[in-house]
Image (cartoon, helix red, strand yellow):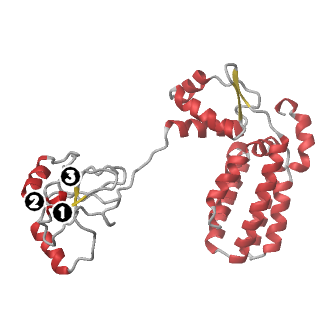
Amino acid sequence: MGLGQAGWAGCPVRAATADHAEARDRAGPPAADRRRIAATSGRPSRLRPSRTARGGGNGPDGCAAAAVPASRGTAIWDPRYREPGYTLRMSESQPSGRAVSRPGAEMPILAPFGRRPSASDFAFDSLRRAILDLALPPGTLLSRPGLAARLGVSQTPVREALIRLQAEGLVEVVPNASTRVARIQVESAREAHVLRLALEVEVVRRLAEAGDPALAGTLRGLLAEQEALLGRGDHAGFAAADEAFHAALHEAAGIPALWDLVRSRSGHLDRLRRLHLPAPGKAATILQEHHRLAQALAGRDAAGAERILRAHLSGTFARIEAIRAEFPAYF
């Protein structure tokens, strides 16, 4: 229960007049609780409800001075009652009503939690990228201890990462036997292609109709990066920049979460495209099509953008039999 909701101990919350608020500020908490606050300087504490909090009702407006969360009976002080130099707030991560006392600076009611990537996320991202870039080719045996040593993490994050990769169809786990990189499944790649085509056709149509100058600037920067990577012959970097180009379209359309969904279903398709990328002229064709698509969007040509995108996303499937013949062990 948040501090602004009903449930103050002793009476329901009601709109306070200016006189009531001023009286609260002058009164502060009862003396016994002020002593408890002072005793907890700089460290978390759990305050027991005082007689007032239990319903004594001797606050300036006849209400108790403490908020009692619905889930627990522990009280914390209304932030309007302030001891000089201290501020008490209920943290979102402390639903039990733990009061936090800190000298000086004020703590916000909903303090942001600066979350860093976990070891499990790091292992998952690293292994997924290695699989999609074919640094870990289809059929490769995966040793959990070996992967943990290479990544510099314990085996638990590696195990969690492998479970997630298995859910995406990129890893095959045989209980009590072996774990290996899954071979490319053409049917799964075809399903992902249909999903991506249906979604991105709608995305480029909407973007062309809207005409977004900011998007045009973003795409120019991404295209310049792709040109530089192509010039260096960096296929892995070029593939990542290609992905960033399409992610920018979803971001501009206001549906970045759907791009994440497409990515989670496109592991087999992405590896097909990665096999095709080094073919003579393929990367240059991708870059040319990106330029044409960006021009159609800037010119608000919805029909042209849709036509270019369909051809752009279908190039690899037109060559699928040749790719399978060249890399039979990957299928």
Residue at the extreme top: 177
Across and down, in percent, residue 211 comes to: 68, 76
Q: Quadrant of the N terminus?
A: bottom left
Q: Which residue is mark 3?
A: 102
Pick the residue in front: 73 or 189. Answer: 73
Query: Of residues 11 and 177, which is closer to you in this image?
Result: 11
Q: Earlier in the sequence, mark 2 or mark 1?
A: 2
Q: Which residue is mark 1?
A: 65
Say which residue appears at 86% left-offset and 60% top-offset.
311
What amino acid is labelled 3 in the image? Arg
Residue 126 occupies which quadrant of the picture? top right
Q: Identify the mark at residue 235; answer none if there is no mark.
A: none
Q: CA distance from mark 2 to mark 1?
A: 8 Å
Residue 261, percent from left and from top: 67, 52
User: Can you say whether 138 is above or below 322 in the image?
Assistant: above
- Closest to the camera, between mark 3 and mark 2, is 2
